[in-house]
Image (spheres, rainbow, N blue to C red):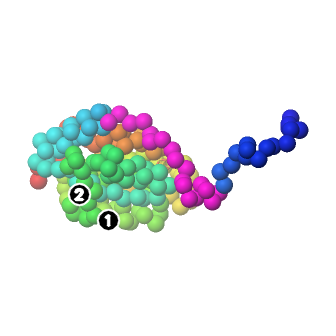
Amino acid sequence: MTSDRPRSASSPRPRRPTLFGLIRSGLPEPPPPTDDTLVRDLGLRVQERARQRLGRSLALRLVDAGSCNGCELELHALQNPFYDLERFGLRFVASPRHADVLLVTGAVTRNMREALERTYQAIPDPKWVVAVGDCPATGGLFSQSYACVGPASAVVPIDLTIPGCPPRPQDLLAGLLALLESNGKPGRR
Ligand code: SF4
């Protein structure tokens, strides 16, 4: 129901946000809830186990075999100032020859099959391969696509799967810790 009373000059109509205004000022959102103590604890344990197991920090090489980029965003989040992965000695490396762990995201597309195989071959033994997210684990949403070969296990041997769509940064850290605490593969080289 609308009021018949005329709006006085002293009570102006409330301003609605305009598209221009939103572009100028952005749409502020609160940061996601994060248990910093849990992240720090996981990170320190990963650092300690990597030193015991490898005698140094853990080096990671990522291959996006055909993901929607959701999993990459979470992996990138590990490197931002909020999670600050490098304070625990973990780092992403550009060359597979410097890596201990191959992280695979996405269901493997036909175009990326050879790149994934060659990256795997280039990482020195012993090495771990981790499927990050549901897509490389099962083929996920894209398993029936004509463009996909299938899950990562159809191309390279998988040592660990971190489920989720996408997995959260703390799940990724917990997965890497499980890898370092497992009995299989790398020792010092
Ligand atoms: S698991 Fe989910 S977020 Fe990750 S690549 Fe597949 S669809 Fe994207």
Distance, label 1 to label 2, CA atoms, is: 14 Å
Quarter that holds the N terminus: top right
Mark 1 vs mark 2: in front: 2
Element at badge 1? helix
| Whether residue 54 is situated above or below residue 113 in the rendered picture | above
Q: Residues within 10 Å of mark 2 (few under 14, many from 20)?
A: many
**Magenta residues, start to end:** 19-36
Name which residue type carries label 2: Ala
Residue hosting label 2: 99
Q: Please say whether residue 32 is one of the residues in the magenta stretch.
A: yes
Q: Residues within 10 Å of mark 1 (few under 14, many from 20)?
A: few
Residue hosting label 1: 118
| Whether residue 79 is situated above or below residue 170 in the rendered picture | below
61 with respect to 134 (left or right): left
Image point (25%, 40%), residue name: 43
In depth, the one of 50 and 181 nearer the eye is 50
Image point (27%, 48%), residue name: 85
Image point (50%, 58%), residue name: 148
188 with respect to 117 (left or right): left
Name which residue type carries label 1: Arg
Does any portion of residue 134 appear in the rendered image? no
Q: Quadrant of residue 170?
A: top left
